[in-house]
Structure formats: C-alpha cells, structure tokens
Amino acid sequence: MRRLIAHISFPLALVTAALIFNSACRNRSSLEAHAARQPIVSASALWNDSKGNGIPDCIRLRSFNDRENFRRWFTSIAELQFYHQSDAWKPLQRDCAGLVRFAWREALREHNRLWFHKMDAAYEPFAPDVRAYTLERNPLGEKLFRAKSGVFKEMDLIDGTFSEFADARTLKDFNSTFVNRDRREAEPGDLLFFYQPWAQKFPYHVMIFLGKAHLSGEDDATNGANDWVVYHTGTSPTDSGTIKKVRLQVLDEHPDKRWRPVMTNRNFLGFYRLKILQ
C-alpha cells in the first residue's frame, strides 16, 4: 500500500485507501448482514478524528472484544520475550520502545499457521484475532505510529506524520494518553513512562503493564499477583540490554528511588493508554 501511495496522486491515493479499508473500519459480520441497506460511506468520513487526538477513527479498536483481544495478544507477546526473544524481533530494534513496537505490530497481524511458524513453538492462540483490521490490511501498513502533534488530516497519510519507528517519547506524546499515576487505574496493555533528564540521549523509558502474568515461570511464585510489568532495559555501546519481568511491588523498593513507580517519584510520569484503545 505504501508503494502505491507513493506513485499516484494524493486525491486518488485517499480514495484507493478508503475503498480498500472501508470493510475493515466496520464490523464485518454486520456489514454482510446489512449490506443491502447500508448507505455509501464517503472517503472523507472514513478518516474522521472524533477524539481530536491525531488517530483516525477507523484505526481505533472501537469494539470491546477487539480491545480485549488486542490487549491479550499485545501483553502476551511482550511477556514471551522475557522467556525467549523471537528471531522476528530484529536485534537493532531491541530496546524499551522497540519492545512496544514489536508487540503492537505482532498483535495486529493475522495469526495463522505461517505466523506461528515464523515466531516459534512457544506461541499459542492467546485470543481471537482483532477483527477491525490486520497489519497486512490497513492503509497505514507498517507505519502505525504517529510522529507529530495535531488532529488527523488526510494529508498525514503521505507527509511522514505516521512512521514505522517511534521512540519512547513519541509513544508517550503522540500515540498514548495519560491515565493516572495511580496503578489502580491501570489496565493490561497500558504503558508506564519514566523521565530521567540526566540521560540526555534517551531520557524517556517505557514499560508495559501486564496486570496478571499470562505465562508461568519460576518468578510467578506469588499466585494472583496483578501488578506485573515487562520491559527492555535499553542498550548502550557496551551493553545490549535485557528483558525484565517484575512486579510493581518489587520496583517500589528499587535501590534507585528515581526508578520507583510511585506517585511521590517525580521521575515516574504515570500510566498511559494507547490511543487506538480509546
């Protein structure tokens, strides 16, 4: 789709994207059942931004089931990286924001036989697939991440507003919305952000809130715990970093108080929710 947009005029690109994505932005079973009496939806209507948050409505997961299924895939794929990092997650993409990008993309793919073969034997059908659209069938393609501020405009599709890459700050500023600094308001799939201004090159750090752990392991000794997070520690010229899975209760006692996810820590920015889930 990206190649097609690059070689045709802007108005035609928008119409083509709208026609391809029209069925993906509405419930498919409803569309089939009521096709005879459904009014024709204009191309511009498909790109409404009713939230005014920069994300077009047809990219948001508007049904409860889609949101829950996405959360389950997103958190499970991220959690699995703690036990075994997938070869599909390229080494150069492995950092804290890279874990979010990887789990987000893979959560939206069609989870068919080829997908499971690509990932490895540890993966299983964690939930039904998201029905609204798949990564392979949407006008943004791999460019899932908004990289600029502002309300969505159709020009955003071709002017670089959406990107295949997003660092931690971009995920916070343009792709998620602040929920609370109180963990009791968090839901699985929310992101935790920290800001450490002394780290001038990468001052923002992101973790993924799991809630309850989906996968068993020796670290899951406390039954019923619902405050698990998973994150990549980040990379440096001398350290490729690692994946950690830990309870917030443990992080509350981190020896460096600046990394404690508590309301009294000004370096902890709080919990944020992906805009596609709103």
Image (tube, grey):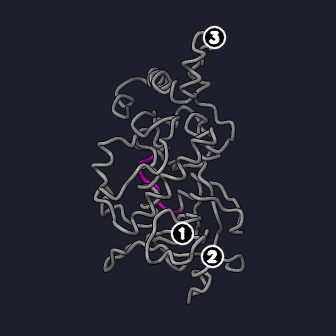
Query: Which residue corresponds to mark 3?
Result: 37
Q: Quadrant of residue 90?
A: bottom left
Query: Which residue corresponds to mark 2?
Result: 261
- Sequence-wise, the earlier of marks 1 and 2 is 1
Which residue is painted at 50% across and 74% down in the image? Answer: 220
Which residue is painted at 35% across and 41% down in the image? Answer: 112
Pointers 1 and 2 in contact (C-beta within 8 Å): yes
Q: Nearer the viewer, residue 273 or 248?
A: 248
Residue 167 forms part of the magenta stretch: yes
- Sequence-wise, the earlier of marks 1 and 3 is 3
User: Distance from label 1 to label 2 (Cα)?
Assistant: 11 Å
User: Distance from label 3 to label 2 (Cα)?
Assistant: 52 Å
What's under tag 2, amino acid-wise? Answer: Pro
Is 56 drawn above or below residue 10 in the view shown? below
Pointers 1 and 3 in contact (C-beta within 8 Å): no
SS for callout 1: strand
Query: Which residue corresponds to mark 1?
Result: 229
Q: Nearer the viewer, residue 264 or 245?
A: 245
Q: Nearer the viewer, mark 1 or mark 2?
A: 1
Residue 269 lies, in percent from the top left, at: 64, 69
Q: Quadrant of residue 196?
A: bottom right
Q: Nearer the viewer, mark 3 or mark 2?
A: 3
Magenta stretch bounds: 163-168
SS for callout 2: loop
- Sequence-wise, the earlier of marks 3 and 2 is 3
Which residue is painted at 60% across and 75% down in the image? Answer: 248
Residue 58 lies, in percent from the top left, at: 57, 33
Name the image quarter holding the N terminus: top left
